Amino acid sequence: MAHAGKIEIEVSPGGPGIEGTLFSDSKLFADAFRTIIVEKKLAAGGNSGRWGKLRSDVHSATVSRMTYSYSRNGRTFTRTYHARSGPAMEVVLARNKLIGVDGNAVSGTSGTSGTSGSESEGSRPYSMSEEDIAKDFSERKYYPADTPTDIRVRNLAPVDDGIVRSSGKEAAIHSADAELKIFRQIEKDVAEGAVEAGGTLTGYVSKAVCPSCTAAAENLAEEYGIDGTIHQLVEPGAEVGLADDTLLQSKEASTQLKLARKDYARTNLQRNAVTAPEEGGWLETKAVQSIEAEEAARSLAQPCGE
């Protein structure tokens, strides 16, 4: 590359546009669970504990949306990547004893009542097998269809000789992080010529970016000359930077997003009451850019000290 790029990771103060964008994506990921549950007739299985844990896995997973802009033959193109942390839905459902290894519903409600649901799928050790990767690929039918401009990022094996990998003492825990999935997909797209290197990345993440994904972002930027900014909402329990007004606003925005996602999961993922969602689509990049511009203008219009 002509230059080594740099991707900044900043604390976002949130706002209706950012929270709304991430909530829009999180709804579509939750709706995918609704669709597979209805199709496979899983709603009558399990017990209250298992369903509570499933809801927690759905609303606690990290959601990330990143738009990559690049130039080709003098024209600018964009591709937006949508990802949630964790394995394929069948793997999540199997962990919660709602689906068997054969992919069919588990009959009866026997078993333990489940755990408290404080731990998300994306934060648990997960080693991607070829079978799990194949399951995630087959589940593409439950999401809005991929287009040249919008991609639902699935679990991928690392690119041969690629540089995007989880790292650190707890690398296995972060192998299915939402951000890492997107970085891996971008690396794959560059390698296959679907996008060009040397572009600009603008991202939003529902939780603080971990050191493993921070390192992966640095490697991606340096290797492929990518510049950009990732805006992270910081959950209340996370320690990120100094406790200034922006961090406090970010934690409040994170809380509001969490409550909205939790309410959506509670409303739509109840045993014996799951219904198929209406057909949806990813929020268009132009709509997000319009929201960003409106929020920037509103921020600049604020008197000093407010």
Image: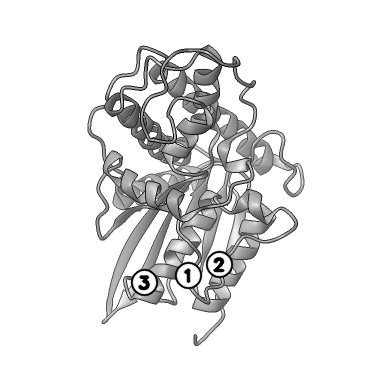
Q: Regarding mark 3 in the picture, which secondary structure is present there? A: strand
Tell me where residue 175 sits by quadrant.
Answer: bottom right
Of the pair 167 and 224, the residue shown nearer to us: 167
Q: Which comes sooner in the sequence, label 2 or label 1?
A: 1
The reply to whether dot 2 and dot 1 touch (C-beta < 8 Å) is yes
Of the pair 200 and 60, the residue shown nearer to us: 60
Q: Is residue 55 above or below residue 239?
A: above
Residue identified by numbered label 3: 70
In three-dimensional space, the C-alpha distance between marks 2 and 3, rounded to whole angstroms, equals 19 Å
The reply to whether dot 1 and dot 3 touch (C-beta < 8 Å) is no
For residue 159, which numbered disc appears in the image?
1
Q: Is residue 123 above or below residue 180?
A: above
Q: Nearer the viewer, mark 1 or mark 3?
A: 1
In three-dimensional space, the C-alpha distance between marks 2 and 1, rounded to whole angstroms, equals 8 Å
Q: Regarding mark 2 in the picture, which secondary structure is present there? A: loop
Q: Position of residue 184 (x, y in %)?
A: 48, 63
Task: Say which amino acid is labelled 3.
Answer: Tyr
Q: Is residue 306 visible?
A: no
Residue identified by numbered label 2: 164
Q: Is residue 240 above or below residue 197?
A: above
Q: Position of residue 226 (x, y in %)?
A: 49, 72
